[in-house]
Amino acid sequence: MVLKCLGSGSSGNCYILQSDSGEKLILECGLPFREIKRGLDYDLRGVVGCLVSHRHSDHSKALHDVIKAGIRVLAIEDVFVALDVKYRTLCKTIQSMRGYVIGGFRILVLEVAHDVPCVGFIIEHVEMGKLLFVTDTMMLEWQLPPLDHIMLECNYSDATLQRNIDSGLVPAVMRERLMRSHMELQTAKGVLTENDITQVKEIVLIHLSGNNSNAELFKSEIGKATGKPVYVAERGFVMDLSKEPY
């Protein structure tokens, strides 16, 4: 199983899971569809579906084009209503704590805490085991099952945010918005250390803030806290997600 990152952050989020057998699952469609097609090497064969976490444009920008291309979309009802999706033939409304199967992928949906209705996913496939995908949430209250791979938002550092507020780079009102909608570094550490991540192969940090994050610091801090290899997703990032230990 290969993970490809086409974009991660407020400018647009999209990831592709591609199995050795050729199945492709799109995670988020927050980029222009032409960029998503480019990331798929202009080959939509094998695309079994697209998961969308919530309505915000940086996660759903290409939703209508994805549907027009004949790709099945799994999302909560709020996404389809907010984006005024009228023709639902290829749309599957999903609910928290329900399981779904799409191609060779098994999906468990987890409700998370954002400023609009939002969900995360535990995605399972025979080639990679279980992958946690959680973005755009201020916290994660679920007790997680044993996982093989983790993709987790680590959006900002409170210390960096405060420096930016003090310098005038970031408006002070941004603090409240971030605190109720995105995951701070210390919160991400807590999520990871308070769950059993013994069999996790690696942690991929996603959706870092452009102004209020520090990729190298975040990798170092999360690595020290967990003892796991840590990576930061950015455009062009590619990683093999194997079920077996390296």
Image (cartoon, rainbow, N blue to C red):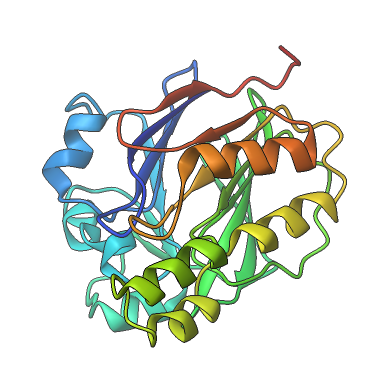
Q: Residue at x 11, y 42 (%)?
A: 34
Q: Nearer the viewer, residue 214 or 136?
A: 214
Q: Quadrant of residue 149?
A: top right
Q: Quadrant of the C terminus?
A: top right
Q: Residue at x 18, y 36 (%)?
A: 37
Task: Point out residue 228 in the picture as x, y percentages from the top left corner.
Answer: 73, 30
Q: Residue furthest left?
A: 34
Let me know if residue 131 appears in the view: no
Q: Nearer the viewer, residue 227 or 30?
A: 227
Q: How many marks?
A: 0
218 w.r.t. 2: above or below: below
Task: Point out residue 118 in the picture as x, y percentages from the top left corner.
Answer: 50, 73
Q: Is residue 154 left or right of residue 28?
A: right
31 w.r.t. 176: above or below: above
Q: Quadrant of residue 243?
A: top right
Q: Residue at x 49, y 16 (%)?
A: 20
Q: Nearer the viewer, residue 60 or 92?
A: 60
Q: Residue furthest top?
A: 246
198 w.r.t. 188: above or below: above
Task: Point out residue 120 in the picture as x, y percentages from the top left corner.
Answer: 57, 60
Q: Is residue 173 left or right of residue 140?
A: left
224 w.r.t. 85: above or below: above
Q: Is residue 63 left or right of residue 218?
A: left
Q: Is residue 196 left or right of residue 115?
A: right
